[in-house]
Image: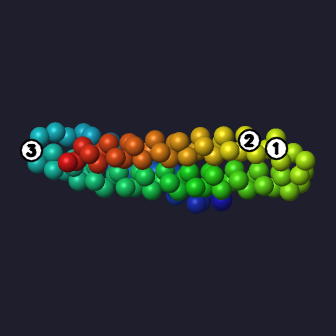
Amino acid sequence: MNRTKMFWGFLFALLVMAFSGVALAGEGGAAALEVQTWIAISAPFGIAIAAFGGAFGQGRAASAALEGIARNPGAASKIQTPMIIALALIESLVIYAFVIAIMFTLKVG
């Protein structure tokens, strides 16, 4: 991945985080409607970024593990277990982001 794509991805992630901060800032009256709007906008963006990051990380981990197994088939059993643990940890971060997005969404209701 080149630096330009990484920069724009990072900038987009910062903007989404900024929206999430605005969503939690106000209280009462017309500000409450605005807060609910920002929560409703930021929760789907947050889970989309988490899903993209998790899928990208899992793809890279699986690719590296399969390349290692292809180069040295005898090490397959030593590579497979840490790869499965890493995939589970990556997936747990995505599930954590999903739980946070659900909590934000339930705050709207």
Check disc 2 and report its element: helix, strand or loop. Answer: helix
- The quarter of the image holding the N terminus is bottom right
Identify the residue at horizontal 76%, vertical 52% (top origin). 64
Give residue 41's position: percent from left, percent from top: 31, 55
Residue 26, relative to residue 13: is it above or below? above
Residue drawn at (23%, 53%), measured in percent from left and top?
37
Measure the alpha-carbon separation of dots 2 and 3.
54 Å
Please give the label number shown on residue 77: 1
Q: Are marks 1 and 2 in contact (CB under 8 Å)?
A: yes
- What's the amino acid at mark 3? Gly
Tag 3 residue: 29
Tell me, yes or no, if residue 15 can be seen here.
no
Residue pictured at 37% horizontal, 55% vertical? 44
Which residue matches tag 2? Answer: 81
Q: Amino acid at mark 1?
A: Ser
Residue 14 coordinates in the image, percent (x, y): 44, 48
